[in-house]
Amino acid sequence: MMPRTTTAILSALLAATTPHASAQTTVGCDASCPPAGYESDSSHLCPGSSVSAFQSTREHVICHPTPGTSFSFDSFRLPGSVTVLANYYTGCEAGRRESGVFAGIAQRIHDETGGKINFVSSLKGGGSCELWAGVYQSDALSMGLNGGVKPSSQPLTITDVNYDVRDFFFTPPYPHPSYIILDENLEVTYKSVGPCCGYVSYYDCTDEVALGLDGMLTEEIYEVYNSQQEAAADVGKGKEVDVEPDTEDGGSTTDETLTTVEENFVEPESQCSAEEFSDWSACSVTCGTGRLQFRHRANSYPVETRPCAETLPACEEQCVQEFGESFSATVVAGGLSSPRDLAFHPTPGIHLGDYSEGRTFHPEVGEEIWVANGRNHSISILASVGTPFQTSMSRVDRGYYHYMNNISALSFNMVDDSGRNSDQDTFNFFAVCNDNLNDYVGSKEANYFMGPTLYDSDVANKPGRKNTVNRFGEDCSSPADECFFLHADMLHESPACIGIAHDPEIETAYGSVFWAFDTTGDNGGDGGQLVRFDFSQPHGPGSMDHSVAVVRRYPEVKLYRDTVHSDTHAGMVVHPTKRVLFISNPAKGTVVSVHVDSGTYSRTAREEYPIFSNRLPSFEYSIYECVEQDAEFVSGLDTPTGLALSTDLARLFVAERGGFIRAIDVETGVILSTINVGDRGYTSIGGLSVSPTTGHLHFVDMDSNQVVKIEPESVESCFYDSHVNDDFITRVSEAELLIRNECGETDLFSVSRDYTCQVDATIPNGTLFDQVHTDTGYASDNPDVQSMAGMDEAAALLENRTDCEFDSELNLDALLLGGYYCHKCLPRNEGSSCDAGGVCKNVQWSGFTCDNEYFVDYTYIGGGKDNARLKLSSLHYGKAFAPDEMIELSRGVTYRFTVRTGEGRPVSIGALPQFSAEISVSDSVKSLISVSGVSNGPILVTVDDSTPDCLFISSPRTKCLPLKIEGGSSDCAAIAAEAPKGTAQSSPEFDGWENMNWENSSGEIVGSFLAHSSMMAFLFGFMLMSCRYGS
């Protein structure tokens, strides 16, 4: 097919877009810096700020006008120089009108100042950079700029493929199109938004409006330029005549004027046109099958490969350190809920701290393992692993039915030394993958609006950020609070995802790139495909803004889930130095290797995959092709699942679901050694992970609900030889050097690239994008839905909807946007997860309350310890109960009493009207604390037929509070009144109790939450306490 011309392409797309008569809006066009609401965020580069060394030293490849050259902003750090940077998204949208004006301004002012002022256009969003740069320069000509001469040497156009230029210089939510002026020291002197910002369509922003950019920028540029010239003259550095700004476009192009970058551009001496290939290389390995040979030439098509021609001997089994000569399989933890994956936390203790939910932790010892439980949609945190203090904690998202629905995988950002801005770095963040089509735990017809969810696990260093919340939606800061994850972001382009891996790259500003195994990727129903998610700037807790993200699909990487077992996990891991992603392909019995920095933009994904997170240009949703991969890096496996790299990155471990674990040579894909844990009862292996401290391999087994550690024995004699063919490596080095010297390109040579693959990048149809917020993907027309407010007032009207049927028109995603965590149509106890038997009440855009939760605080009346008493309160009922006001507990309900009395003021609940520090077995009263009672944390009371007529909340040297049980005949109030206030069983733990500082400790009333589905696992092993009282 003949390629279409640029004019034909643009004409077709513009013709497909009906002009709108709508006026300019003001959505997102405030040029304040930092943006409103981000005043404390140091990542925003504002006037007076200097470009950091981390960004100024980065090399940026120029696509136009000198393709193949590059520059760093440091190259513009010259006396008297000025740099002007523009931020654009490709496509036929309103902001494109300004790009031609910018090109005209750039050439004119660059020429007027003898090359002292340089202009940079940063393009993002897909498409051909060279094509768009050419369009912009043609636009300048058609609008009569630059004296009627088409710009040729300015601006320098770069493809911001990693969005790092945008995220460093124009940190979202700063609007676009936008501009920055840097002085000779790379200090920001001016930052603003272009005149086309806020126009809905390309047609709304006319040439007349766009030309306003000329006067706006020209005046500011020359103010900086002339002031620098004057300053230089004042210190005796020479005199320069002020240049008057020319806004009439009378300048001309000076071909002789070159930037520093252009002066350094050297054409390769060779034409890179050799026809003859070299001889075939040696085979890449010395044993085994499935490897390759290559031959090369100095040409744009420089490499051919073929399977090894000779038959090689089979590879012998060797010994690796992780397996040893023999091994033991030790259970690390049990009682999980169909665990699918596990990962070691990069910073143990940063989430739980020393104390959480009434429990003491010891972050200073041992490692921390996080486990994804598919059955109950939770994360189990195993703290202080391998020490006497080892314990576990289960934690969920309040909206688990959307954000953690059937978790299949999780992965942490483990990169602690990226050099990123501290306000942008996502170190300690983790993402989960959900194997679900968004059916709200089977209660709603699937709408496929599902994908990975991102969380920030750092609670200790970010107080008040609400990375965890109580059920009322407040920051989970009280040691008595029950805490829940609050997601930092979510994207929705990979329903039924079974594998995820963080990319340890250091090119993006935030480091929030994850790779996912999308099982539904092939629209024809033939398997899935690889998807790259860059959350870019996570929207943060409490927001629903998905407008700043990058999602790229790789349909050539064909992936297939296990069709026999629906819960099979697919391991994924990125080799940080080789930049290779390894993926288990369960149904094919292979491990796929993908070079993650390969591939080229082909087209937008919005037409072929119409379910996506946002319609704004700042949300890129693209299809990439011509990726470098080996579909059978390892083959012949039986349902491969978990993957993990050794601590020295030399070995890849792959588990087979049925129980085999194999060690693979990363260089060759050859199997080095194999162990069998299936004969020890582990026949449903999921994720693998290697301890960063000991190097020991860990795995989860789904049927036994365990985490298991492989402990090698007799490792002293464990050594292995790599099967890499040295002659092959030598030939690779020689070929790389030859092609680099002859062709002038450093990355042209590759033995994994398909050089016959050519991408004909197409420009996306403008109708697939909105320039302002008019729709969100959540079926709401309110632009606030995807603002930091995250409050959709229209969705709030859904309170009275009762059409909860499986196939009704009610969109449950809209309930979340409407601020509902409790609604009659949400699954499992109206979505609230109150303790068993509880009834919830929604608190709009905050959370919910439960009628079976009460708070126990300590207070005093009139001063002095003689008047100390307990106080009972409820968020659900919005009150603190009077001392003589008794509550009644219903049978068949589990009640949560969250104690917040503080250290030295223990509380118990029992059948006697006195404090009891002894343990007695009971099915009714459960506590997280042992003999010392509870001072910060929950006491759970399950009321059933065996529960006595009265229970009492007691604390040493206070009057107890009676609790009446439904149907009981005893006078609980009278029993409590007759009990002496000073009653307390003797215990040395309370010696000196009367000397405590009795300040009012009533505190602010907050809630707490625990998913009912994970209750049994959560309470397993806790101490039981209470006394029985007969009427």
Image: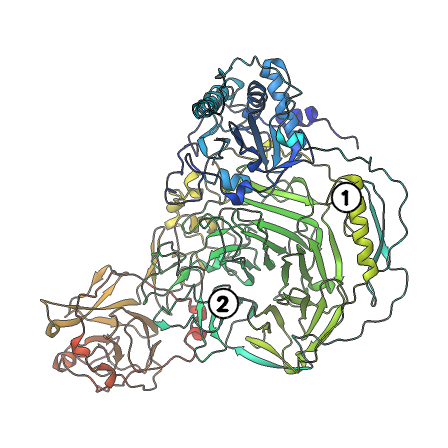
Q: Residue at x 55, y 42 (%)?
A: 164
Dot 1 amino acid type: Arg
Q: Which residue is mark 2?
A: 376
Viewer-side residue, 928 vs 233: 233
Residue 392 location, x and y as percent? 45, 73
Q: Is residue 701 visible?
A: no
Total labels drawn = 2
Residue 464 picture quarter:
bottom left
Residue 655 location, x and y as percent? 67, 70
Q: Residue at x 11, y 72 (%)?
A: 867
Viewer-side residue, 754 vs 657: 754
Dot 2 amino acid type: Asn
Which quarter of the figure is the C terminus placed in?
bottom left
The answer to whether 749 is drawn above or below residue 651 in the figure is above
Q: Which residue is mark 1?
A: 740
Residue 569 location, x and y as percent? 62, 65
Residue 71 picture quarter:
top right
Residue that extends furthest to the front in the rendered view of this protein: 236
Q: Residue at x 69, y 47 (%)?
A: 598
- Secondary structure under tag 2 reads loop
Residue 816 location, x and y as percent? 43, 51
Labels 2 and 1: the sequence-earlier one = 2
Viewer-side residue, 87 vs 51: 51
Q: Residues within 10 Å of mark 2 (few under 14, many from 20)?
A: many
- Secondary structure under tag 1 reads helix
Q: Is residue 368 left or right of residue 974?
A: right
Q: Is residue 81 left or right of residue 994?
A: right
> What kind of colouring is applied to the model shown?
rainbow
Residue 63 picture quarter:
top right
Cα distance in 3D space between marks 2 and 1: 54 Å
Q: Is residue 135 visible?
A: yes
Q: Residues within 10 Å of mark 1 (few under 14, many from 20)?
A: some
